[in-house]
Every structure is written in C-alpha cells, then in structure tokens.
Image (cartoon, rainbow, N blue to C red):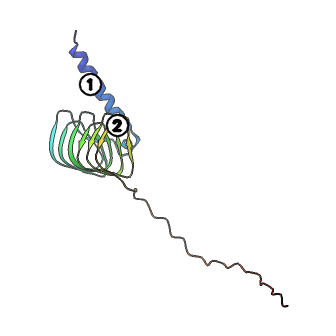
Amino acid sequence: MWDVKQDVQDSVEQERDDITDLTTNPAIKDAGGIIAFVGKGVEFNGTITYSGTVRIDGYLNGEIHTDGILLVGENAVIQAKITAGTIICKGKITGDIVAKERVKLCDPAVVSGSVKTPVLSVEDGVLFNGDLEMVRAARALPREIPAREVGVIAQPELKRANG
C-alpha cells in the first residue's frame, strides 16, 4: 500500500539533507550562512542583487547579481544572467554565468549557456551544454624587486704567443 505520509516525510528529510550538504561547505560558513531562501514552488521574475549567500529552490527568471554565494537546489529552475562570486548548483540553469571565484556543478545539475570562471568543478552525472571560458583569478601583483647592478666576471687576459 502507498504510504503518502511516509513519502512526504522522506521528501522533507531529503530536502533537509540537501540543504545540510550545501550549507556545511566551509565557503558558505565563512560567508556568514544563508541570508535568503527562495523555496520550492516559489516563482520569481526580476533582478536579485544581494551580498552573502542565497539559496534558490524555486523558479527564477531574470538576473542575479552578487559578490557572494549562490546555491541552486536540486528542484530549482533558473533562466537568468548570473554574476556571482561562487555558484554551487544541483538544479537547472539556462543562461550566461560569470563567477569571480568558482562554479561547482553537482549531480544532477543541468546547465545550458556560457560559463566564465577561474575554477570549475563538475561531478559525474552533470549535463553541461554551452561555452566555457576559464579566466585567471585576480591576484595581487608581486612586489617590485629593486634592480641591482650586475657584476661583470673578469676575464683573464689571453697571452699571445709572439713568434
């Protein structure tokens, strides 16, 4: 017999495990935890701009701009131009992605569009269709080293045989 109550409970526990998996990431802890959550079944059209960490499990159509972290849950469907510091995705993204730090695509993610990032991680089972541009991460330039005079090695004079 089909146990609806057990199926709902299993589904809730799986969602809790998914959230725990994403939120125990050290990068997310360092960012101060999740500051906003767009839940499953929520539809949003427009532009989101934020600092910190946001998790999306619903439907979003528009743009996302942040220097922080974007978590895309397994049930999320995003059709957007995304600019972020770090993106961790288990859901579906259609659109262009620019990440300043990294993009991590976790099974069963589906990404269609261009990705520009210095670091890309892709698990087995992910579907990626699009262009990829790997760029070097911005880093501090080395301190200038003062120029020194280069010594000349003295050469012994060659004695000619006069003959």
Residue 16 screen position, x and y as percent: 30, 28
Residue type of the residue flagged with mark 2: Cys
Secondary element type, mark 2? loop
Q: Which residue corresponds to mark 1?
A: 12
Measured in 3D between alpha carbons, the distance from the residue under mark 1 to the one under mark 2, in whole angstroms, is 20 Å
Q: Is residue 57 left or right of residue 137?
A: left
Q: Which residue corresponds to mark 2?
A: 106
Residue 159 screen position, x and y as percent: 81, 86
Mark toward the start of the polypeptide (1 vs 2) = 1
Q: How many marks?
A: 2
Residue 42 screen position, x and y as percent: 16, 36
Name, please, the residue furthest toward the bottom: 163
Quadrant that contains the N terminus: top left
Residue type of the residue flagged with mark 1: Val
| Residue drawn at 77 percent across, 81 percent down | 156
Foreground: disc 1 or disc 2: 2
Q: Is residue 94 left or right of residue 121?
A: left
| Residue drawn at 36 percent across, 33 percent down | 21
| Residue drawn at 22 percent across, 12 percent down | 2
